[in-house]
Amino acid sequence: MLSKNQIKFITKLGQKKYRLQEGLFVVEGIKTITELLNSSFELYQLYTTKEFNGATEESVIISEADLKRISFLKTPNTALAIFKIPKQVPVDFNGLVVALDDVRDPGNLGTIIRLCDWFGVKDLVCSQHTVDCYNPKTLQATMGSITRVNITYTDLDVFLEKAKTPIFGAFMDGENVYATTLPQAGVLLMGNEANGISKIVETKVSQRIAIPRFGTLKATESLNVATATAVLLSEFRRGA
């Protein structure tokens, strides 16, 4: 049976400040945990209600009642693991990089991480106010793709200033992406769900691109940022 202190310690990791303080994050679900166990991520502790194929000396068998106490899900998924947050590594400008300007929704970020994995984007750069990639909801949405994408949090304005490749910003009034010649190396900059790309980083954009609307009325205000990222990444990879 887990002690009150253990339960408190684990549940506090649901908050960003404690994750950063402890250098740890929580992952739930057999698939995602297995993905991380088979990656370079370092396991700190594994809690499971039954024998786990990737069981190690850090594994602890607990009751379903205890799992419910520490889980961040409405329906706990038989296992919960704590991993160590890895150290950031330098961004590789030789390929396509995705940069996010204050994306706030955990589900959007998780989906964008999966998209980067799908389209072979190795580096995802996030502004310091973008939602934490180790947020439990974000991790669920990545479905394990977080193990194959290098995620960096930094001052986005400074990062873009130092970028060695062209920066393509997604705007409603940009050039039609379907009529634009796109390189294999560059930075794709996506903005906040409500406000788009901020004025501060907009000045660093080399080329403004847009996904045109084809409806008769053209009344849709905008696309979800994750959906827009999918469309744009597909265009960057066309003919690759």
Image (cartoon, grey):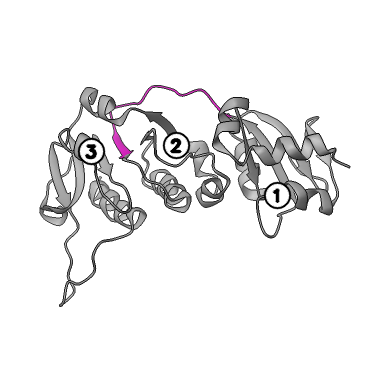
In the picture as drawn, the residue positioned furthest to the right comes out as 1
In the rendered structure, which amino acid carries the disc numbered 3?
A: Gln
Relative depth, front residue between 109 and 52: 109
Left or right: residue 3 compared with residue 166: right
When the figure is inspected, residue 164 is found, relative to residue 134, above or below; the finding is above
Circle 3 or circle 2, nearest the eye: 2
In the rendered structure, which amino acid carries the disc numbered 1?
A: Ser
- Give the structural element (helix, strand or loop) at label 3: loop
Q: Position of residue 182 (x, y in %)?
A: 17, 44
Q: Position of residue 138 (x, y in %)?
A: 51, 47
Q: Position of residue 99 (x, y in %)?
A: 31, 38
Over which residues does the magenta segment extend? 85-99
Give the number of the disc on residue 71.
1
- CA distance for labels 2 and 1: 25 Å
Mark 2 or 1 closer to N-term?
A: 1
Quadrant including the N terminus: top right
According to the picture, the residue beneath numbered tag 3 turns out to be: 184
Q: Is residue 55 visible?
A: no
Give the number of the disc on residue 149.
2
- Give the structural element (helix, strand or loop) at label 2: loop
Left or right: residue 90 compared with residue 23: left
- CA distance for labels 1 and 3: 41 Å
Mark 1 or 3 closer to N-term?
A: 1
**Which residue lies at the image location 17% right of the left edge and 71% below the top edge?**
218
- Picture quadrant of residue 164: top left
In the rendered structure, which amino acid carries the disc numbered 2?
A: Val
Circle 1 or circle 3, nearest the eye: 1
Tag 2–tag 1 contact (CB < 8 Å): no
Circle 2 or circle 1, nearest the eye: 1
Tag 3–tag 2 contact (CB < 8 Å): no
